[in-house]
Image: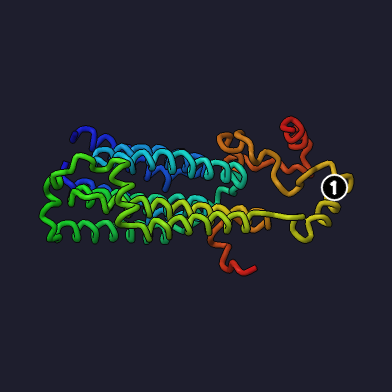
Amino acid sequence: MNINWFLIVSALMFALGAIGVLVRRNPLVVLLCLELMLNAGNLALLGFSRMWGDGDGQIFAIVVMVVAACEVAIGLGIVVALYRRRLPIDVDELRELAG
Amino acid sequence: MAFFFFLFALVALAGAVGVVVLRNPFYCVLSLVVHLIALALLFLLLEAQFVAAAQIVVYAGAVMVLYVFVVAYVGGGDRPELLWRAGARQRALAIAFGAMVFIELAIALLGTGLKALDTHGAKLPADYGSPEQIGELLLNNFLLPFELASILLLIAAIGAVALVGRRGGLPGDEEALAEITPDRTLVNPVRPAASGTMAEGVGGYGITTPMPDPVTDPAARTLREDRS
């Protein structure tokens, strides 16, 4: 398969993730859609790595995975903290996160 | 090769659509697991074996387990109007924006000067994508990003514990508890009865039927007692 095909799939996945982030109201699902976008980026990075034939793109992809894991840990921590404070689990009603 | 590519790409895109469209967050997580596994297979088609394995172990394994736990904890208790309450106009705008992003990326792809994109890629060294190559690159060429990533993980772990860790309860908890159940029969009166159970995740609590209220509804009380 040509590398182009992988990049097109990656672009479609990224657009789907962006739509999800904009449409969904549950912060858990917003985080899931962010994962979609990060993974689309990973697919493109690995495609470029394959194109050049050296492994640098794979290192990028692994660093992206690390960043995504950190984002998940903090994001889910915030969601659990919201739930404990009886705040609504809805990004529309969480206009201010102070205190 | 082409057959497998289209198969995996279709499954991955179907999983992505499922994440965006499904209403129960539990099903969204399962859909993302399907998506991640198909994506790991796509990585394999790109000869990135180590990243594919890491994808399955780290993402489909560890991170998704974290998600499942949080969804079971916070969970399907969403009121249905919260999920898709975004007005039709906002939804249309979001879809238009997504289409715009895709078209822009496609234009960038078409107009690129990278001629090699139309090929199968460069000739690969024998150890391409193997753990040996990744380890060598990480420790020789990319040592600083490697160390920074480990520090980032440490900070995230400490931050998550500091966010969620709870010592001695929130202020006001004791009074609220005493007010609702003077005899302290209910351990956590605010949490809905079935939250944290599989029944909540797949039983559609909160989507079709509201969670029973543990304070007023005796049925919910037996539900809680069954569990303990």
Residue B10: percent from left, percent from top: 29, 38
Q: Is residue B7 visible?
A: yes
Q: Is residue B39 visible?
A: no
Which of the pair A40/B10 is nearer the observer? A40
Which of the pair A7/A91 is nearer the observer? A7
A99 lies left or right of A17: right
Q: Residue furthest top?
A: B226
Mark 1: few/some/many CA within 10 Å (<14, 14-19, 20+) = some
Q: Is residue B114 above or below residue A96?
A: above
Residue at the image position 12 percent from the left and 49 percent from the top: B118
User: Quarter of the image containing the N terminus of chain B?
Assistant: top left
Amino acid at circle 1: Thr
Residue identifier under label 1: B181
Residue B139: percent from left, percent from top: 34, 53
Residue at the image position 79 percent from the left and 60 percent from the top: B172
Residue at the image position 78 percent from the left and 56 percent from the top: B173
| Tag count | 1
B27 lies left or right of B122: right
A27 lies left or right of B139: right
Specify the color scheme.
rainbow
Residue B35: percent from left, percent from top: 37, 40
Q: Is residue B107 above or below residue B53?
A: below
Q: Is residue B182 above or below residue B145?
A: above
SS for callout 1 = loop
Residue A78 sits in quarter: bottom right
User: Quarter of the image containing the C terminus of chain B?
Assistant: top right
The chain containing the residue under callout 1 comes to B
Residue at the image position 18 percent from the left and 43 percent from the top: B125
B178 lies left or right of B35: right
